[in-house]
Amino acid sequence: MSAEAAVAGIVIVGAGQAGVMTAEALRSGGFEGAITLLGDEAYGPYHRPPLSKAWMAGEIEAAQLVMRAPEMLARKHIDLRTGVTVKGIDRDAKNVILGDGTILPYTGLVLATGSTPRALTLPGGDAPGVLALRTRDDASAIADRLSSCIEQQRPVVVIGGGFIGLEVAATARKKGLAVTVLEAAPRLLGRVLAPVLSDWYAGLHRSHGVQLMLGAQVAAIETGADGAVSGLKLADGSVVPAGLVVVGIGVSANDQLAQAAGLECDRGIVVDACCRTSDPLIVAAGDCTARRLPDGSLLRLESVQNATEQGKSAAAALLGQDRPFTATPWFWSDQYDKKLQMAGLSMGADDWAIRGKMNGDMAAGTFTVYHFKGNQLIAADSVNASKDHLLVRKLLDAGVSPTREQAGDVGFDLASLLVK
Protein backbone atom coordinates (compact mmCIF):
# COMPACT_ATOMS: atom_id res chain seq x y z
CA MET A 1 0.00 0.00 0.00
CA SER A 2 1.14 3.52 -0.70
CA ALA A 3 0.69 6.26 1.87
CA GLU A 4 -1.03 9.48 0.82
CA ALA A 5 1.31 12.45 1.29
CA ALA A 6 -1.50 14.93 1.92
CA VAL A 7 -2.22 16.12 5.42
CA ALA A 8 -5.21 14.38 6.99
CA GLY A 9 -8.48 16.21 6.53
CA ILE A 10 -12.10 15.32 5.92
CA VAL A 11 -12.70 12.53 3.42
CA ILE A 12 -16.12 12.20 1.78
CA VAL A 13 -16.97 8.86 0.17
CA GLY A 14 -19.60 9.56 -2.48
CA ALA A 15 -19.80 12.51 -4.87
CA GLY A 16 -23.56 12.71 -5.26
CA GLN A 17 -26.03 15.18 -3.77
CA ALA A 18 -25.27 14.35 -0.13
CA GLY A 19 -21.50 14.32 -0.58
CA VAL A 20 -21.39 17.65 -2.42
CA MET A 21 -23.73 19.31 0.07
CA THR A 22 -21.56 18.14 2.95
CA ALA A 23 -18.38 19.44 1.33
CA GLU A 24 -19.88 22.84 0.58
CA ALA A 25 -21.46 23.13 4.02
CA LEU A 26 -18.09 22.41 5.61
CA ARG A 27 -16.53 25.28 3.67
CA SER A 28 -19.39 27.69 4.36
CA GLY A 29 -19.23 26.64 8.01
CA GLY A 30 -15.63 27.78 8.29
CA PHE A 31 -13.69 24.55 7.89
CA GLU A 32 -10.31 25.41 6.34
CA GLY A 33 -8.66 21.99 6.26
CA ALA A 34 -8.36 19.55 3.37
CA ILE A 35 -11.59 18.14 1.90
CA THR A 36 -11.35 15.15 -0.45
CA LEU A 37 -14.49 14.15 -2.35
CA LEU A 38 -14.36 10.63 -3.77
CA GLY A 39 -16.71 9.53 -6.56
CA ASP A 40 -16.81 6.06 -8.08
CA GLU A 41 -18.24 7.22 -11.41
CA ALA A 42 -16.25 8.75 -14.26
CA TYR A 43 -18.27 11.96 -14.07
CA GLY A 44 -18.27 14.81 -11.61
CA PRO A 45 -21.39 15.48 -9.51
CA TYR A 46 -24.60 15.52 -11.55
CA HIS A 47 -28.35 15.79 -11.01
CA ARG A 48 -30.15 12.43 -10.89
CA PRO A 49 -33.87 13.37 -11.10
CA PRO A 50 -33.71 14.17 -14.86
CA LEU A 51 -32.24 10.75 -15.68
CA SER A 52 -35.60 8.98 -15.97
CA LYS A 53 -37.20 11.86 -17.84
CA ALA A 54 -35.48 14.64 -19.82
CA TRP A 55 -32.05 12.92 -20.10
CA MET A 56 -33.50 9.58 -21.16
CA ALA A 57 -35.78 11.35 -23.62
CA GLY A 58 -32.83 13.20 -25.17
CA GLU A 59 -34.30 16.59 -24.25
CA ILE A 60 -31.25 17.97 -22.41
CA GLU A 61 -27.50 18.01 -22.97
CA ALA A 62 -24.84 16.61 -20.66
CA ALA A 63 -23.92 20.11 -19.48
CA GLN A 64 -27.45 20.53 -18.09
CA LEU A 65 -26.99 17.50 -15.84
CA VAL A 66 -23.94 18.98 -14.10
CA MET A 67 -24.53 19.77 -10.43
CA ARG A 68 -21.11 21.25 -9.68
CA ALA A 69 -18.36 21.63 -12.26
CA PRO A 70 -14.95 20.37 -11.08
CA GLU A 71 -13.49 23.87 -11.42
CA MET A 72 -16.21 25.26 -9.15
CA LEU A 73 -15.30 22.72 -6.47
CA ALA A 74 -11.61 23.46 -6.99
CA ARG A 75 -12.23 27.15 -6.29
CA LYS A 76 -13.57 26.08 -2.90
CA HIS A 77 -10.48 23.93 -2.39
CA ILE A 78 -12.50 20.73 -2.56
CA ASP A 79 -10.39 17.96 -4.08
CA LEU A 80 -12.72 15.97 -6.36
CA ARG A 81 -11.47 12.56 -7.44
CA THR A 82 -13.60 10.60 -9.89
CA GLY A 83 -13.44 6.94 -10.87
CA VAL A 84 -12.23 6.03 -7.39
CA THR A 85 -13.30 2.95 -5.46
CA VAL A 86 -12.99 2.60 -1.69
CA LYS A 87 -12.34 -0.90 -0.42
CA GLY A 88 -12.06 -0.35 3.32
CA ILE A 89 -12.02 1.87 6.38
CA ASP A 90 -9.46 1.45 9.15
CA ARG A 91 -11.12 3.19 12.07
CA ASP A 92 -8.23 2.57 14.47
CA ALA A 93 -5.68 4.18 12.14
CA LYS A 94 -8.25 6.70 10.84
CA ASN A 95 -7.55 5.77 7.23
CA VAL A 96 -9.60 5.15 4.11
CA ILE A 97 -8.12 2.49 1.83
CA LEU A 98 -8.71 2.98 -1.88
CA GLY A 99 -9.02 0.28 -4.50
CA ASP A 100 -5.50 0.91 -5.80
CA GLY A 101 -4.03 0.58 -2.32
CA THR A 102 -3.70 4.31 -1.66
CA ILE A 103 -4.26 5.26 1.97
CA LEU A 104 -6.09 8.49 2.81
CA PRO A 105 -5.85 9.60 6.46
CA TYR A 106 -8.85 11.41 7.87
CA THR A 107 -9.74 13.59 10.82
CA GLY A 108 -13.40 13.19 9.92
CA LEU A 109 -15.13 10.81 7.52
CA VAL A 110 -18.39 11.22 5.61
CA LEU A 111 -20.18 8.22 4.12
CA ALA A 112 -22.49 9.36 1.33
CA THR A 113 -22.45 6.10 -0.59
CA GLY A 114 -26.03 6.17 -1.87
CA SER A 115 -27.97 3.08 -2.84
CA THR A 116 -28.09 0.37 -5.51
CA PRO A 117 -31.13 -0.93 -7.44
CA ARG A 118 -32.28 -4.35 -6.29
CA ALA A 119 -31.35 -7.01 -8.81
CA LEU A 120 -33.85 -9.23 -10.56
CA THR A 121 -33.00 -12.69 -9.24
CA LEU A 122 -34.74 -14.70 -11.95
CA PRO A 123 -33.54 -16.96 -14.74
CA GLY A 124 -32.36 -14.67 -17.53
CA GLY A 125 -32.28 -11.65 -15.23
CA ASP A 126 -28.82 -10.68 -16.46
CA ALA A 127 -29.64 -10.91 -20.18
CA PRO A 128 -28.74 -7.99 -22.47
CA GLY A 129 -31.64 -5.57 -22.56
CA VAL A 130 -32.58 -6.10 -18.89
CA LEU A 131 -31.58 -2.84 -17.26
CA ALA A 132 -31.98 -0.91 -14.02
CA LEU A 133 -31.72 2.85 -13.53
CA ARG A 134 -29.48 4.58 -11.03
CA THR A 135 -26.61 6.30 -12.81
CA ARG A 136 -26.08 8.46 -15.85
CA ASP A 137 -24.61 5.48 -17.70
CA ASP A 138 -27.67 3.40 -16.78
CA ALA A 139 -29.97 6.07 -18.21
CA SER A 140 -27.90 6.34 -21.38
CA ALA A 141 -28.00 2.56 -21.84
CA ILE A 142 -31.80 2.57 -21.45
CA ALA A 143 -32.08 5.49 -23.90
CA ASP A 144 -29.99 3.57 -26.48
CA ARG A 145 -32.19 0.52 -26.04
CA LEU A 146 -35.32 2.67 -26.41
CA SER A 147 -33.96 3.89 -29.73
CA SER A 148 -33.45 0.28 -30.83
CA CYS A 149 -37.00 -0.56 -29.79
CA ILE A 150 -38.29 2.33 -31.90
CA GLU A 151 -36.32 1.15 -34.92
CA GLN A 152 -37.44 -2.46 -34.52
CA GLN A 153 -40.96 -1.64 -33.27
CA ARG A 154 -40.45 -3.74 -30.15
CA PRO A 155 -42.31 -3.16 -26.86
CA VAL A 156 -40.96 -2.05 -23.49
CA VAL A 157 -41.75 -3.78 -20.22
CA VAL A 158 -41.25 -2.18 -16.83
CA ILE A 159 -41.08 -4.42 -13.76
CA GLY A 160 -42.25 -2.43 -10.75
CA GLY A 161 -44.94 0.20 -10.42
CA GLY A 162 -42.96 2.63 -8.27
CA PHE A 163 -41.85 6.13 -9.16
CA ILE A 164 -38.80 5.19 -11.24
CA GLY A 165 -40.70 2.53 -13.18
CA LEU A 166 -43.65 4.81 -13.91
CA GLU A 167 -41.43 7.71 -14.92
CA VAL A 168 -39.60 5.44 -17.38
CA ALA A 169 -42.96 4.15 -18.64
CA ALA A 170 -44.15 7.70 -19.25
CA THR A 171 -40.93 8.57 -21.10
CA ALA A 172 -41.21 5.48 -23.29
CA ARG A 173 -44.86 6.20 -24.11
CA LYS A 174 -43.99 9.78 -25.08
CA LYS A 175 -41.63 8.20 -27.63
CA GLY A 176 -44.55 6.22 -29.05
CA LEU A 177 -43.47 2.82 -27.75
CA ALA A 178 -45.84 0.11 -26.53
CA VAL A 179 -45.34 -0.17 -22.75
CA THR A 180 -46.45 -2.75 -20.20
CA VAL A 181 -45.95 -2.24 -16.46
CA LEU A 182 -45.86 -5.38 -14.31
CA GLU A 183 -46.53 -4.76 -10.61
CA ALA A 184 -46.60 -7.61 -8.11
CA ALA A 185 -48.78 -5.68 -5.65
CA PRO A 186 -52.50 -5.09 -6.16
CA ARG A 187 -51.97 -1.38 -6.86
CA LEU A 188 -49.37 1.10 -8.10
CA LEU A 189 -47.17 3.01 -5.65
CA GLY A 190 -48.72 1.05 -2.82
CA ARG A 191 -45.99 1.88 -0.29
CA VAL A 192 -46.28 5.64 -0.71
CA LEU A 193 -49.75 6.61 -1.97
CA ALA A 194 -53.27 6.22 -0.64
CA PRO A 195 -55.51 3.88 -2.69
CA VAL A 196 -57.50 6.79 -4.13
CA LEU A 197 -54.32 8.27 -5.61
CA SER A 198 -52.96 4.89 -6.72
CA ASP A 199 -56.17 4.40 -8.67
CA TRP A 200 -55.87 7.88 -10.19
CA TYR A 201 -52.32 7.16 -11.38
CA ALA A 202 -53.43 3.83 -12.83
CA GLY A 203 -56.06 5.72 -14.80
CA LEU A 204 -53.51 8.31 -15.92
CA HIS A 205 -51.16 5.69 -17.35
CA ARG A 206 -53.95 3.71 -18.96
CA SER A 207 -55.24 6.91 -20.58
CA HIS A 208 -51.80 7.28 -22.19
CA GLY A 209 -51.89 3.74 -23.52
CA VAL A 210 -49.83 1.90 -20.91
CA GLN A 211 -50.93 -1.66 -20.21
CA LEU A 212 -50.93 -2.27 -16.46
CA MET A 213 -50.77 -5.78 -15.07
CA LEU A 214 -51.31 -5.70 -11.31
CA GLY A 215 -50.65 -8.72 -9.13
CA ALA A 216 -48.26 -9.93 -11.82
CA GLN A 217 -45.65 -12.55 -10.92
CA VAL A 218 -42.64 -12.82 -13.24
CA ALA A 219 -41.19 -16.34 -13.47
CA ALA A 220 -38.33 -15.86 -15.93
CA ILE A 221 -36.79 -13.66 -18.59
CA GLU A 222 -36.89 -15.21 -22.04
CA THR A 223 -34.17 -14.54 -24.60
CA GLY A 224 -33.91 -14.72 -28.37
CA ALA A 225 -31.33 -16.25 -30.67
CA ASP A 226 -28.97 -13.34 -30.02
CA GLY A 227 -29.11 -13.97 -26.26
CA ALA A 228 -30.88 -10.67 -25.59
CA VAL A 229 -34.24 -10.31 -23.87
CA SER A 230 -37.26 -11.23 -25.97
CA GLY A 231 -40.00 -11.43 -23.34
CA LEU A 232 -41.07 -12.21 -19.81
CA LYS A 233 -42.69 -15.44 -18.76
CA LEU A 234 -45.28 -14.96 -16.02
CA ALA A 235 -46.24 -17.43 -13.32
CA ASP A 236 -49.47 -18.27 -15.16
CA GLY A 237 -47.45 -19.37 -18.18
CA SER A 238 -48.23 -16.38 -20.39
CA VAL A 239 -45.43 -14.46 -22.08
CA VAL A 240 -45.17 -10.68 -22.40
CA PRO A 241 -42.93 -9.74 -25.37
CA ALA A 242 -40.18 -7.18 -24.76
CA GLY A 243 -37.26 -5.56 -26.54
CA LEU A 244 -36.28 -3.79 -23.30
CA VAL A 245 -36.99 -4.61 -19.68
CA VAL A 246 -36.47 -1.91 -17.07
CA VAL A 247 -36.29 -3.23 -13.52
CA GLY A 248 -37.59 -0.84 -10.86
CA ILE A 249 -38.16 -2.98 -7.77
CA GLY A 250 -36.59 -0.69 -5.20
CA VAL A 251 -33.08 -0.01 -3.92
CA SER A 252 -30.79 -1.18 -1.14
CA ALA A 253 -28.62 1.15 0.91
CA ASN A 254 -24.91 0.95 0.15
CA ASP A 255 -23.82 0.24 3.72
CA GLN A 256 -21.26 -2.49 3.01
CA LEU A 257 -18.24 -0.30 3.85
CA ALA A 258 -19.87 0.76 7.09
CA GLN A 259 -20.76 -2.81 8.03
CA ALA A 260 -17.22 -4.01 7.35
CA ALA A 261 -15.90 -1.18 9.52
CA GLY A 262 -18.12 -2.25 12.41
CA LEU A 263 -20.56 0.68 12.33
CA GLU A 264 -24.15 0.11 13.38
CA CYS A 265 -26.26 -0.71 10.31
CA ASP A 266 -29.85 -1.81 9.86
CA ARG A 267 -30.93 -1.69 6.20
CA GLY A 268 -28.72 1.39 6.05
CA ILE A 269 -26.09 3.18 8.12
CA VAL A 270 -27.81 4.07 11.38
CA VAL A 271 -27.54 7.78 12.19
CA ASP A 272 -29.13 10.20 14.62
CA ALA A 273 -30.96 13.39 13.63
CA CYS A 274 -27.56 15.10 13.22
CA CYS A 275 -26.19 12.30 10.96
CA ARG A 276 -23.76 10.94 13.55
CA THR A 277 -22.97 7.25 13.28
CA SER A 278 -21.84 4.96 16.10
CA ASP A 279 -18.30 6.34 15.57
CA PRO A 280 -17.89 9.98 16.68
CA LEU A 281 -15.50 10.72 13.79
CA ILE A 282 -17.80 9.32 11.11
CA VAL A 283 -21.05 10.80 9.80
CA ALA A 284 -23.33 9.56 7.02
CA ALA A 285 -25.85 11.28 4.76
CA GLY A 286 -28.28 10.53 1.95
CA ASP A 287 -29.79 7.32 0.61
CA CYS A 288 -27.33 5.11 2.49
CA THR A 289 -28.70 6.12 5.90
CA ALA A 290 -31.41 4.93 8.28
CA ARG A 291 -32.27 7.68 10.76
CA ARG A 292 -33.05 6.68 14.34
CA LEU A 293 -36.20 8.46 15.49
CA PRO A 294 -36.98 9.41 19.11
CA ASP A 295 -39.27 6.39 19.48
CA GLY A 296 -36.42 4.07 18.45
CA SER A 297 -37.77 3.27 14.99
CA LEU A 298 -35.74 3.79 11.84
CA LEU A 299 -36.66 6.03 8.91
CA ARG A 300 -35.18 5.70 5.42
CA LEU A 301 -35.78 8.56 3.02
CA GLU A 302 -34.64 8.59 -0.60
CA SER A 303 -34.92 12.14 -1.91
CA VAL A 304 -32.93 15.18 -2.99
CA GLN A 305 -34.21 17.09 0.03
CA ASN A 306 -33.05 14.40 2.43
CA ALA A 307 -29.60 14.23 0.84
CA THR A 308 -29.28 18.02 0.91
CA GLU A 309 -30.42 18.50 4.50
CA GLN A 310 -28.52 15.52 5.85
CA GLY A 311 -25.40 16.81 4.11
CA LYS A 312 -25.75 20.08 6.00
CA SER A 313 -26.38 18.23 9.26
CA ALA A 314 -23.38 15.98 8.70
CA ALA A 315 -21.10 18.96 8.10
CA ALA A 316 -22.35 20.66 11.24
CA ALA A 317 -21.70 17.51 13.29
CA LEU A 318 -18.09 17.38 12.07
CA LEU A 319 -17.76 21.04 13.07
CA GLY A 320 -18.96 20.21 16.58
CA GLN A 321 -22.42 21.66 16.13
CA ASP A 322 -25.95 20.27 16.34
CA ARG A 323 -28.10 20.83 13.27
CA PRO A 324 -30.81 18.19 13.34
CA PHE A 325 -32.76 17.54 10.17
CA THR A 326 -36.33 17.91 11.37
CA ALA A 327 -38.07 19.66 8.46
CA THR A 328 -41.10 18.11 6.80
CA PRO A 329 -39.94 15.58 4.18
CA TRP A 330 -40.96 16.34 0.62
CA PHE A 331 -40.64 14.54 -2.68
CA TRP A 332 -41.74 14.92 -6.28
CA SER A 333 -42.33 12.92 -9.45
CA ASP A 334 -43.01 14.05 -13.03
CA GLN A 335 -45.09 11.77 -15.25
CA TYR A 336 -46.45 13.05 -18.56
CA ASP A 337 -47.69 16.59 -17.88
CA LYS A 338 -48.45 15.88 -14.22
CA LYS A 339 -46.22 16.89 -11.33
CA LEU A 340 -46.81 15.07 -8.06
CA GLN A 341 -45.46 16.90 -4.99
CA MET A 342 -45.60 15.08 -1.68
CA ALA A 343 -45.19 16.67 1.76
CA GLY A 344 -44.97 14.67 4.97
CA LEU A 345 -45.25 10.91 5.39
CA SER A 346 -48.71 9.44 4.86
CA MET A 347 -48.04 6.02 6.43
CA GLY A 348 -50.54 5.43 9.19
CA ALA A 349 -53.16 7.80 7.81
CA ASP A 350 -56.72 6.67 8.48
CA ASP A 351 -58.67 9.26 6.49
CA TRP A 352 -58.19 11.86 3.80
CA ALA A 353 -59.83 14.86 2.17
CA ILE A 354 -59.56 15.86 -1.49
CA ARG A 355 -59.32 19.49 -2.54
CA GLY A 356 -59.81 20.14 -6.25
CA LYS A 357 -61.34 22.76 -8.50
CA MET A 358 -64.60 21.44 -7.15
CA ASN A 359 -64.71 19.80 -3.73
CA GLY A 360 -63.53 16.21 -3.93
CA ASP A 361 -62.90 16.43 -7.69
CA MET A 362 -59.77 14.76 -9.15
CA ALA A 363 -60.97 14.56 -12.74
CA ALA A 364 -59.49 17.91 -13.77
CA GLY A 365 -56.00 16.69 -12.85
CA THR A 366 -55.31 19.54 -10.42
CA PHE A 367 -55.92 18.60 -6.79
CA THR A 368 -54.44 17.79 -3.39
CA VAL A 369 -55.11 14.78 -1.19
CA TYR A 370 -54.76 15.69 2.51
CA HIS A 371 -53.94 12.75 4.80
CA PHE A 372 -55.13 12.65 8.40
CA LYS A 373 -54.33 10.44 11.35
CA GLY A 374 -57.08 10.96 13.84
CA ASN A 375 -57.73 14.69 13.64
CA GLN A 376 -54.15 15.61 12.71
CA LEU A 377 -52.91 16.43 9.22
CA ILE A 378 -49.78 14.33 8.63
CA ALA A 379 -49.15 14.64 4.87
CA ALA A 380 -50.52 15.85 1.56
CA ASP A 381 -50.01 14.82 -2.07
CA SER A 382 -50.53 17.55 -4.67
CA VAL A 383 -50.91 17.03 -8.42
CA ASN A 384 -50.26 20.15 -10.51
CA ALA A 385 -51.02 22.20 -7.39
CA SER A 386 -47.69 23.71 -6.31
CA LYS A 387 -49.28 26.43 -4.19
CA ASP A 388 -51.10 23.80 -2.14
CA HIS A 389 -47.84 21.88 -1.72
CA LEU A 390 -45.88 24.88 -0.45
CA LEU A 391 -48.67 25.82 1.94
CA VAL A 392 -48.94 22.27 3.30
CA ARG A 393 -45.23 22.25 4.08
CA LYS A 394 -45.69 25.43 6.10
CA LEU A 395 -48.66 23.94 7.95
CA LEU A 396 -46.80 20.73 8.76
CA ASP A 397 -43.64 22.56 9.84
CA ALA A 398 -45.75 24.74 12.15
CA GLY A 399 -47.72 21.77 13.51
CA VAL A 400 -50.96 23.42 12.40
CA SER A 401 -53.76 21.16 11.20
CA PRO A 402 -56.95 22.07 9.36
CA THR A 403 -60.02 19.95 9.87
CA ARG A 404 -61.02 17.52 7.14
CA GLU A 405 -63.85 19.83 6.19
CA GLN A 406 -61.52 22.82 5.89
CA ALA A 407 -58.97 20.85 3.85
CA GLY A 408 -61.58 19.69 1.37
CA ASP A 409 -63.36 23.06 1.04
CA VAL A 410 -61.87 25.11 -1.83
CA GLY A 411 -63.64 28.13 -0.41
CA PHE A 412 -61.72 27.98 2.87
CA ASP A 413 -58.40 29.85 3.04
CA LEU A 414 -55.97 27.37 4.60
CA ALA A 415 -53.30 30.06 4.81
CA SER A 416 -55.47 31.87 7.37
CA LEU A 417 -54.61 29.11 9.86
CA LEU A 418 -51.01 30.33 9.92
CA VAL A 419 -51.94 33.91 10.82
CA LYS A 420 -51.34 34.59 14.50
Image: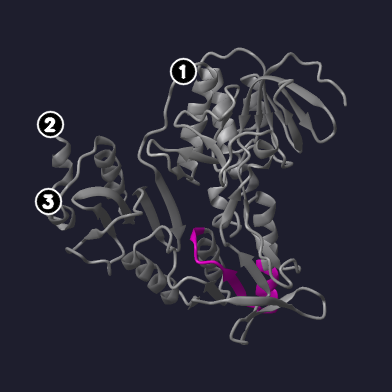
Alpha-carbon span between mark 1 and mark 2? 32 Å
| Residue receiving disc 3 | 412
Report if residue 132 is visible in the image.
yes
Which tag is nearer the camera, tag 1 or tag 2? 1
Badge 3 amino acid: Phe
Mark 1 residue element: loop
Residue 420's label in the rendered image is 2
Q: Nearer the viewer, residue 201 or 5?
A: 5
Q: Is residue 122 above or below residue 35?
A: below
Q: Is residue 116 above or below residue 393?
A: below
- Measuring from the top left, give residue 311's x and y in whole percent: 52, 31
Return the disc, 3 or 1, that comes first in the chain's sequence: 1
Report if residue 44 is visible in the image.
no
Q: Nearer the viewer, residue 193 or 357?
A: 193
Return the disc, 1 or 2, that comes first in the chain's sequence: 1
Quadrant of the image containing the N terminus: top right
- Measuring from the top left, give residue 270's x and y in whole percent: 54, 37
- Measuring from the top left, give residue 131's x and y in whole percent: 68, 63
Task: Please check the rendered image and state whether residue 320 is part of the magenta-colored stretch, yes or no.
Answer: no
Mark 2 residue element: loop
Return the disc, 2 or 3, that comes first in the chain's sequence: 3
Residue 321's label in the rendered image is 1
Question: Which residues are the magenta region?
Answer: 146-163
Q: Is residue 54 left or right of residue 198?
A: right
Q: Is residue 111 left or right of residue 341?
A: right
Residues at marks 1 and 2 touching, judged by CB atoms closer than 8 Å = no
Q: Is residue 133 above or below residue 418?
A: below
Q: Nearer the viewer, residue 52 or 121?
A: 121
Q: Nearer the viewer, residue 206 or 236?
A: 236
Q: Is residue 50 left or right of residue 377?
A: right
